[in-house]
Image: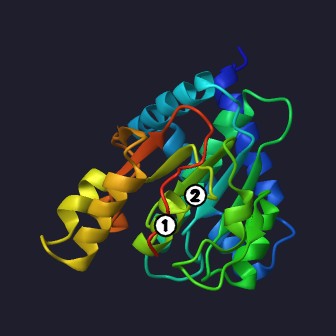
Amino acid sequence: MPHIIPDAEVSTSQKQRQRKAKYKSLPRELLQLTTRLPDLQDLYAQSQLARSVNRQLQAISKAGSPVTRIVSLGLGSLLVTKGQSRRLKQLAVLLAIRDCFQDRRNEPIEVYAQDPTFTRADETLLAAIGIQILRTSSGSDLGEAAAFITPETVVYSPFLTLEAYEQLLLNSSVPMRYLIGDDFDALLQKWPKHSPERKQVEGLTRMGLSEYRRKAIVGEGFWTADDETFPMAVYSRSGAEPNKLKAKI
């Protein structure tokens, strides 16, 4: 009697082959790196973390205007050995977020990434998986990303600098509605009282996030202690009006 492969296994196998096929044209130096990404995508898909994130994404999809674009800030170079596992996992989460929104749209979701440490090899890899590159001269500046953030954009920004968060949250010309990034409740506990960084976080929480609803992202099965990750949260607000508060930067 022939062995019947369940549809779920066939689907997973097909996805793996499709993902790996995308990387065949990449330079040899990137091939070893890209072989890890499909496995991380599958690990994420099976985790409790993915279910937690997906619940928040579904809420965003039902809230109003459809998401048409994702802008990733602060991803970091994928070729630097230190912290590489965490950054690859952050990329896997970004791709999963894209796929989740894409399932609800007929037109492709635009995905952009910006980080001052991107190398040409990083840009080649990201372009191979459908991510367009934006540029900035500094990790404390929004650079080209400022012009690409609309009320229909989700900003994905784990490990972003506080200075960039100031521009993102306090700059009245950036009409951000959805943010998936660092959990500011946890950031308040990270810095000692009376430190400059603590004052920055307090100011961002009071002036930049007062109009946003916070939902912490929790879930096991993906991050490990070696990844040295930081708690994340989803922030969203109703309406599409730009923040009226002036930036103090």
Q: Secondary structure at mark 1?
A: loop
115 vs 120, nearest the viewer: 115
Which amino acid lies under the numbered mark 1 shown in the image of this protein?
Ala
Is residue 183 something that shows in the picture?
no
**Is residue 249 positioned above or below 215 on the image?**
below
Would you name the residue on which mark 1 appears? 247
Badge 2 marks a residue whose secondary structure is loop
Q: Nearer the viewer, residue 19 or 235?
A: 235
Residue at image x 57%, y 58%? 172
Seen in the image, is 202 located left or right of residue 138? left
The residue sitting at 46% across, 65% down in the picture is: 165
Where is residue 101? Give x, y as percent.
68, 35
The residue nearer to you, when weighing 65 against 239, is 239
Left/right placement of residue 129 relative to residue 8 reads right
The residue type indicated by label 2 comes to Ser
Residue 100 place in picture, x, y as percent: 64, 35
Q: Residues within 10 Å of mark 1 (few under 14, many from 20)?
A: some
Q: Quadrant of residue 99?
A: top right
- Residue position marked by numbered label 2 in the rendering: 172
Q: Position of residue 132 (x, y in %)?
A: 78, 63
Direction from residue 34 to residue 132 in the image, left or right: right
Residue at the (53%, 51%) spot, across then down:
244
- Say above or below: 92 vs 2: below
Q: CA distance from mark 2 to mark 1?
A: 7 Å
What scheme was used to colour the molecule? rainbow
**Residue in the picture at 51% in, 78% down:** 140
Number of labelled discs? 2
Quadrant in the rendering for residue 239: top right
Upstream in the sequence, badge 2 or badge 1?
Answer: 2
Residue 19 visible in rendering: yes
Provide residue 88's location: percent of width, then percent of height: 55, 64
